Amino acid sequence: MFQKLDKLVAEIGQCRICESRLPCGANPVFSVGERSKILIIGQAPGLRVHKSRIPWDDLSGKELRRWLGVSNEEFYNTDNFGILPMGFCYPGKAGKGDLPPRPECAPQWHGAVISSLLQVELVLLIGQYAQAYYLKKDRRKNLTQTVLNWEEYLPHYFPLPHPSPRNFIWRSKNPWFDQEIIPNLQMHVRSILSK
């Protein structure tokens, strides 16, 4: 199985399917290991991550690690976490924030990667794009309602908002997230990582 995943990782690393539509060129950023226990499916790398080639190497990543209650070392250990964005490359800037993830990546690569990750116990669906793709008709009318009803998606999925500093207003309007969801998220994460 190692060889299959290694080959797939190398293939994704060379992917150029949508390169002509990417302002900074193709530079797939993701991180998976055969023994990953928790899979993080986010949106797409930002410009900083595009340059560093380290997933979640920005303020959003720092906040995500706080939410999870893990250290950098735990987070970047692929035996703990696999990181698979909806779009593997930086999509470029929009009016506010970045453009949506390119739509080619998930259908092209996710199925093959996930079928190679045999020890995943929990999938964190971060943001509306991941939730729409994976929850389909089971998601609620909006992200807030989906996250509020997180228990409905267990034991497989745990929906979360994006940890971007831009979401500060959402967090201030929804104090239940910090009060209720984060402690439950940390409990689930610690239970899985301690096995």
Image (cartoon, rainbow, N blue to C red):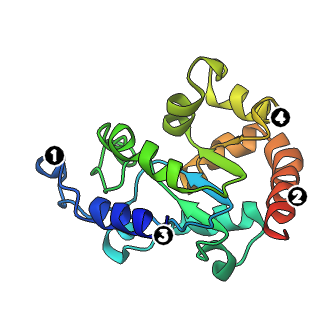
Q: Residue at x 74, y 44 (%)?
A: 172
Q: How many marks?
A: 4
Q: In front of the other: label 1 or label 3?
A: 3
Instruction: Give the CA distance from mark 1 to mark 3.
Output: 32 Å
Q: Is residue 157 left or right of residue 88?
A: right
| Whole-number angstrom distance, CA of label 3 to CA of label 4 | 33 Å
Provide the residue designation for mark 1: 21
Q: Nearer the viewer, residue 134 or 42?
A: 134
Q: Residue furthest left?
A: 20
Mark carried by residue 2: 3
Give the image location of residue 192, x and y in percent. Answer: 81, 61
Q: Which residue is mark 4?
A: 151
Residue marked by disc 2:
187
- Whether residue 8 is visible here, answered yes or no, is yes
Q: CA distance from mark 4 to mark 2?
A: 13 Å
Residue under the image location 58 percent in, 72 percent down:
78
User: Disc 4 marks which amino acid?
Assistant: Glu
The spot of residue 43 in percent (x, y) is 46, 48
Mark before the other along the chain sequence, 2 or 1? 1
- Give me the C-alpha separation between circle 1 and circle 4: 38 Å
Dot 1 and dot 3 residues touching (CB under 8 Å): no
Q: Is residue 142 above or below residue 66?
A: above
Callout 1 secondary element:
helix
Earlier sequence position, callout 1 versus callout 4: 1
Q: CA distance from mark 2 to mark 1?
A: 41 Å
Query: Dot 4: few (<14), some (14–19), or many (≥20) neighbours within 10 Å?
Result: some
Circle 1 residues within 10 Å: few <14, some 14–19, many ≥20 = few
User: Could you tell me the amino acid type at mark 1?
Assistant: Arg
Front one among 182 and 77: 77
Q: Residue 70, image x and y in percent? A: 74, 72
